[in-house]
Image: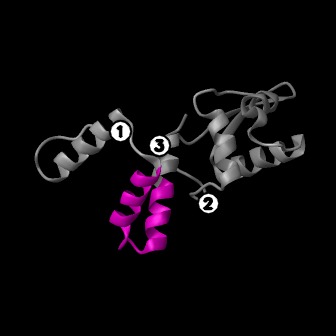
Amino acid sequence: MANGNIGKKNTLTTPEWIVMSALWGREPQVLGEIIETLGDRVDWSYTTYASYMKILSDKGFVGFTTRGRMKFYYAAVDKETCIASEGESILEKLGGSDAEELMLCMIKKTGLSKEGQERMKALIDSLSGKGDAKV
């Protein structure tokens, strides 16, 4: 799985995120396996799934290999890269000026696990010169 170069458009729509979540860590999969992985999370037709796979492939997020008549799909971009691209996109929309407010809002809305709290503390310590962050 590649880490990096996202194609023409560097962010995912909500349905595209749903499809990618079925691929990350489980590739390669045929379309039927992707549908099974998503289960009841969405109620799409087979052609809708196929359309999203084509769109994600065209955008550079998904690749596939063909064996016989079957396509085996895999994530061409890792989850961390996609999250970073989303963050950059949001910061561009905000003009970069409200990044702190955005971060605080996200933390309040989602909460942090103990591990997340430790990672956040390490990052803050690193930014304040108190240590090396392993985030």
Q: Is residue 71 above or below residue 13?
A: above
- The figure's colour scheme reads one colour
User: Earlier along the polypeptide chain: callout 2 or callout 3?
Assistant: 2
Is residue 131 something one can see in this rendering? yes
Residue at point 72%, 29% (across, down): 37
Q: Which residue is mark 1?
A: 116
- 20 and 41: which is toward the camera: 41
- Please give the range of residues in magenta: 85-109
Q: Which residue is mark 3?
A: 80
Is residue 135 something one can see in this rendering? no
- Residue 68 at x, y percent in the picture: 85, 24
Query: Is 93 one of the magenta-colored residues?
Result: yes
- Residue 122 at x, y percent in the picture: 22, 41
Q: Which residue is mark 2?
A: 8
Mark 3 touches mark 1? (CB < 8 Å): no
Three-letter amino acid code at the position of disc 1: Gly
User: Earlier along the polypeptide chain: callout 3 or callout 1?
Assistant: 3
Binning the other alpha carbons within 10 Å of mark 3 as few (below 14), some (14 to 19) or many (20 upward) gives: few
**Quarter the C terminus occupies:** top left
Q: Quadrant of residue 29?
A: top right
Query: Is 104 one of the magenta-colored residues?
Result: yes
Can you name the residue that lies furthest to the left here? 130
85 on left or right of 8: left
- 53 and 123: which is toward the camera: 123
Residue at point 82%, 29% (across, down): 32
**Quarter the N terminus occupies:** top right
